[in-house]
């Protein structure tokens, strides 16, 4: 409330430990890159539960002014679709790590606890 940006995210329940941990760090005033380092250490030592199988994440983001409550639409919002695959690499997936392949899925943060396949309509990062 009171923010000019609208953001909604929907994700598989297996991602909730990572997401809630991130929200808790933010609430404590801990921001990136420190919060990412803390989550990475927790994922690596096993104290942060990560999905064992691919897990979907979808979001819509844009200026609140784009929301039309009468029509129930959010025209022109940026859509993002990802599939989290912790620790995945180019070698284990066969996916490129190059975001410049317009409209093609690509692997972001390969080998990392938050490795995920990016599926961005129109391509790019």
Image: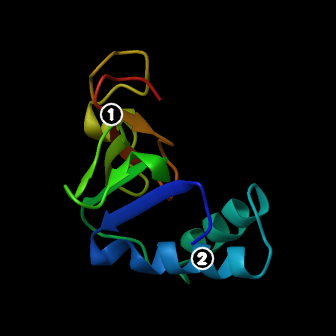
- Between marks 2 and 1, how big is the CA–CA gap? 24 Å
User: Left or right: where does residue 73 sit relative to residue 78?
Assistant: left
User: Left or right: where does residue 77 sit relative to residue 30?
Assistant: left
- Give the residue furthest to the left: 71
In which image quadrant can residue 33 be found?
bottom right
Q: Is residue 99 above or below residue 65?
A: above
Q: Is residue 55 above or below residue 15?
A: above
Circle 2 packing at 10 Å, graded few (<14), some (14-19), many (20+), is some
Q: Is residue 108 above or below residue 42?
A: above
- Identify the residue shown where x is 71% and y is 70%: 38
Name the N-terminal-most of marks 2 and 1. Answer: 2
Residue 53, horizontal then vertical, whole percent:
24, 64
SS of the residue at dot 1? loop
SS of the residue at dot 2? helix
Task: Name the quarter where the N terminus is drawn.
Answer: bottom right
Question: Which mark is on residue 23?
Answer: 2
Residue 94, horizontal then vertical, whole percent:
26, 31
User: Left or right: where does residue 116 sit relative to residue 24?
Assistant: left
Q: Can residue 118 be spotted in the picture? A: yes
- Identify the residue shown where x is 49% and y is 73%: 18
Residue 15, horizontal then vertical, whole percent:
38, 72
In which image quadrant can residue 124 be found?
top left
Front-lying residue, 113 or 19: 19
Residue 80, horizontal then vertical, whole percent:
35, 44
Residue matched to label 1: 120
Q: Can residue 84 be spotted in the picture? A: no
User: Left or right: where does residue 4 sit relative to residue 92?
Assistant: right
């Amino acid at each position: 409330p009171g923010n000019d940006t609208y953001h909604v995210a929907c994700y598989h329940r297996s991602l909730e430990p990572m997401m809630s941990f991130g929200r808790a760090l933010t609430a404590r005033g801990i921001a990136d890159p420190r919060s990412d380092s803390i989550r990475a250490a927790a994922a690596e030592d096993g104290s942060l539960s990560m999905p064992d199988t691919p897990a979907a994440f979808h979001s819509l983001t844009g200026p609140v002014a784009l929301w039309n409550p009468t029509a129930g639409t959010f025209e022109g919002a940026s859509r993002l679709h990802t599939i989290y695959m912790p620790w995945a690499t180019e070698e284990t997936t066969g996916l490129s790590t190059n975001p410049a392949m317009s409209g093609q899925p690509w692997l972001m943060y390969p080998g990392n606890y938050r490795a995920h396949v990016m599926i961005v309509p129109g391509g790019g990062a």
